[in-house]
Each structure stands twice: as C-alpha cells, then as structure tokens.
Image (spheres, rainbow, N blue to C red):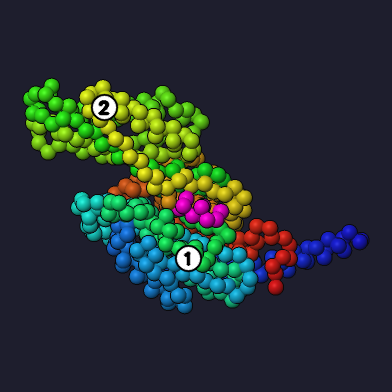
C-alpha cells in the first residue's frame, strides 16, 4: 500500500510537470495548422521572386515585415541582407536559435509551375536564370510559420528564441565575398544572445513527403572550393612544340586527381569526392593559350583526410605541370566545415521528431556528401540539423530531380511536416533543456 501510494504521488507529479508542456505543444500545433495556407502563400511568392546570395533584398523585406506584424523587432542588415528577431517567452528557460536560409541558385527553372521563376540575374559575371532549386523558399516560409505559432504562445513559452534568416548559404553571387553563416557570426549575430542550441532543417528530394531524416554525429560533408591555375607558354596551334600546352596539362592533372581518390584514399573508411565544375582556357581555335583554370569542389568528413587529399592534389598538379614544362598553383578555400549533429542533442531531438511525425517516419540518413554552412553555428553552440522529405507520393525519390536541378519540384505538404517537426523540436528543448529533471524549472 505504501509503495502504491508513493507511486501515485510520483505519477501525479509527473503529470503536473508535463501538463504545461503538453498543453503548450497542443496549442502551438493548432496555431501552426491554421497557418498552413499562409505558409504556402509565402513560399509561392518567394519562389516566383528568387534572389541570389547577398542580393536577397526583397526576401529580407518580406521576412522583416512579417516579423514586425507579429510584434517582434527584427534586426536587419546582418551580413548584408540577413534578418533576425528574438522572441522572449513569459517563463524562464534556455535560449535557442532556429535558422532558415533565404538565397536562390543560378538555375533556369524548368518545372512548368504556374508560379515558376522567370527571374534572371548575374552570377560571378555570368548572366543566369535564378530559381529556388534547393527549397530555401520553403525554409523561409516554415520558419515564419514556426515564429508565428511561438509568438501566439508567448505568455506560456519558456526561454527565448532567435529566428535567424540567413543570406548566401549557397555562396555569394559576387566572387570574393563570404558565405552567409560565417559572415553573420563575424558581424555579431550572437554577440548579445548566446544560444544553448541551434536548430536547422532542409527539404530533401531524396525522401518522400511525410518522412524526415537525420543521424547523430557527422551528417553532411565539408565543402572546399578549389581553383587550379595551370601556366604554360602560348604558341600557334599548328606548332605545339614551340610552346607549353596548359590545356593538356590541366586534363592530365584532372585525370590524376581521380587516381588519388581511387587508389590513394581509403574511401571505405570515409567518403571523399573531388570534382571539377569548370575548365576554362583560350579564346581561339588555333592558339594554344598561356593559361588554363580549373575550379571545383572537395567533399570530406574527416579534417585529417581533407588535408591529406589537398596535399596529394597539390603534389599531383605540380608534378604533372613540371613534367609538361609548365607550372600549377592550387588554391583551396573552405566554405563550410562538415555538419555534425551533437550526439546528446541528436538523441533528444530524434524523440521530438518521432512525436511530431511518427516513429516510422523518422529515418536514419546515410552520410550525405552535399554541404551546408549551417555547420558554422556549431562553433558557438551544439547544433542539430534534419532533412524533410519533399518528393510527392507516387514519385520514386531515387529518380526524382534532386535539389539543385532545374526540375526540382517540392510537394508543399513538406511545409506542414517540416514546420511541425521543427516546432516540436524547439518546444521540447525549451521545456526540457539538458540537465532538466522532473519538476525543475516549472512554475
């Protein structure tokens, strides 16, 4: 009888502790559900008016106007076009930040949507079409929805939430500028607001709508942008022996880099991708030019492996160039470290995702060789990042146009799934931060 009585008391205490959190989550979810048509409206407007990295002027204005309409006081102009706002809850608690990226890609849209982009722009000196081919329009809409739901629960909300709308995740439209996350941090994003955790998400064509995916530890690769300059000696195309052909040397180096990956790196232990995306040289059919330039990306998950591959790449380039009578110079710029989910935070957040979308709809992601500058925020606080399936039912995600494709097509049900998942992750953390025990922090 005594044990039964004590158990009843304990269960009653647990119920009391959970009641505010459960009620808060239910109210917030209801508010978010009512916002679904508005999120679709925001997303379509942004999709039709995409802007390249650091040029997100219209997007930033839309975001700032919506935040002001919620009664928040947005701070604008961080990293050029970044927008942030802080919501202070009515109860004490931790501080978190939730981030959405705003920029579009230099891609000409081929979806045929009634709200498809017809925007053109200039990307690093080249005329391009502009498209939200990676779903950042959806990210902005979802975070505005989450912000609206949390504002509606302000009085009962514990802690503080910073909403971060970041420019230039895909990189700046102008060469030589910085990526958005690093620049926001450099310009004092968290100088007066030190978060206990930072959360982010990304829509993903590789998953069906209704599913979310994540993993503990390393999730996405680091992203290095490399430039290889090969110098030779210009001559007439009919007399190659009078000069040094940088195009031929560049081609030999490029093939040699693939031997590095295939024969010199243990890719069974950690994935590595080394890709060239540009090969530029010459102006005329019968002139061997002085110079060739190759530009590409390196993706790795281990910092030691990254440096080893860079060293091997540089040595391979210099040796091929020397053998051909020319020279080669390799420059490497790291745009984003690997995205690594804090293990303790990932364990907690996975439970939140399962609550939001069902345990059967939370999948374990493999290592993903795409990259995200969200990883920069891990230098400030523990981070957690997850993917939101965006491919419509009836379409095989394995064959659907992937993110960055001109045919990338997002099922707008992903807005509901992603915002609900992020809302649950945020609320659970605010109610039960690390070190939380039953009854702690309750009013």
- The image quadrant that residue 16 belongs to is bottom right
Decide: is 209 above or below 229. Answer: below
Q: In the shown orientation, is residue 328 left or right of residue 30?
A: left
From the viewer's side, name the closer residue of 266 and 117.
266
Alpha carbon distance from label 2 to label 1: 50 Å
Name the residue located 87 percent from the left edge and 63 percent from the top edge. Answer: 5
Quarter of the image with the C terminus in it: bottom right
Q: Is residue 195 left or right of residue 407?
A: right
Magenta stretch?
374-382
Q: Residue at x 60, y 60 (%)?
A: 429
Judge by depth and name the residue closer to the eye, 180 or 228. 228
Which quarter of the rendering shows the N terminus? Answer: bottom right
Q: Position of residue 374 (x, y in %)?
A: 45, 53
Q: Who's the residue at 42% across and 70% down the image? A: 75
Which structural element holds mark 1?
Answer: strand
Q: Which quarter of the picture shows residue 232?
A: top left
Q: Is residue 201 visible?
A: yes
Q: Which residue is mark 2?
A: 321
Residue assigned mark 1: 163
In the shown orientation, is residue 97 left or right of residue 411? right
């Amino acid at each position: 009888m005594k044990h039964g009585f004590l158990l009843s008391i304990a269960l009653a205490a647990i119920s009391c502790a959970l009641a505010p959190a459960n009620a808060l989550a239910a109210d917030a979810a209801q508010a978010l559900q009512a916002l679904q048509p508005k999120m679709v409206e925001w997303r379509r407007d942004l999709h039709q008016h995409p802007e390249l990295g650091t040029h997100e002027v219209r997007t930033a204005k839309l975001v700032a106007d919506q935040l002001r309409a919620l009664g928040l006081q947005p701070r604008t102009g961080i990293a050029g076009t970044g927008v942030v706002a802080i919501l202070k809850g009515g109860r004490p608690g931790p501080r978190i930040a939730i981030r959405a990226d705003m920029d579009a890609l230099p891609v000409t849209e081929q979806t045929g949507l009634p709200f498809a982009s017809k925007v053109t722009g200039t990307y690093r000196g080249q005329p391009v079409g502009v498209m939200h081919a990676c779903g950042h329009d959806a990210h902005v809409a979802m975070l505005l929805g989450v912000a609206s739901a949390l504002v509606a629960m302000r009085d009962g909300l514990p802690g503080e939430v910073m909403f971060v709308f970041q420019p230039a995740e895909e990189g700046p439209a102008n060469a030589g500028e910085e990526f958005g996350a690093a620049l926001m941090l450099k310009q004092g994003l968290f100088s007066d607001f030190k978060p206990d955790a930072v959360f982010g998400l990304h829509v993903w064509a590789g998953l069906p709508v209704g599913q979310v995916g994540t993993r503990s530890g390393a999730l996405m690769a680091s992203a290095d942008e490399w430039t290889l300059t090969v110098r030779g000696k210009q001559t007439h195309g009919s007399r190659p022996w009078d000069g040094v052909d940088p195009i031929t040397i560049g081609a030999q180096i490029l093939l040699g880099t693939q031997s590095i990956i295939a024969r010199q790196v243990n890719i069974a232990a950690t994935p590595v991708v080394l890709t060239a995306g540009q090969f530029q040289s010459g102006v005329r059919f019968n002139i061997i030019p002085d110079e060739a330039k190759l530009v590409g990306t390196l993706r790795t998950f281990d910092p030691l492996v990254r440096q080893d591959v860079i060293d091997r790449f540089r040595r391979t380039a210099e040796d091929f160039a020397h053998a051909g009578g020319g020279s080669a110079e390799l420059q490497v710029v790291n745009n984003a470290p690997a995205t690594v989910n804090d293990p303790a935070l990932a364990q907690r957040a996975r439970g939140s995702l399962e609550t939001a979308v069902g345990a059967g709809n939370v999948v374990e992601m493999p290592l993903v060789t795409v990259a995200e500058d969200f990883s920069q925020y891990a230098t400030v606080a523990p981070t957690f990042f997850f993917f939101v399936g965006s491919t419509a039912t009836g379409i095989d995600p394995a064959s659907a146009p992937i993110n960055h494709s001109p045919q990338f097509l997002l099922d707008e049900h992903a807005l509901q799934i992603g915002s609900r998942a992020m809302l649950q992750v945020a609320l659970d953390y605010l109610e039960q931060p690390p070190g939380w025990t039953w009854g702690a922090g309750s009013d």
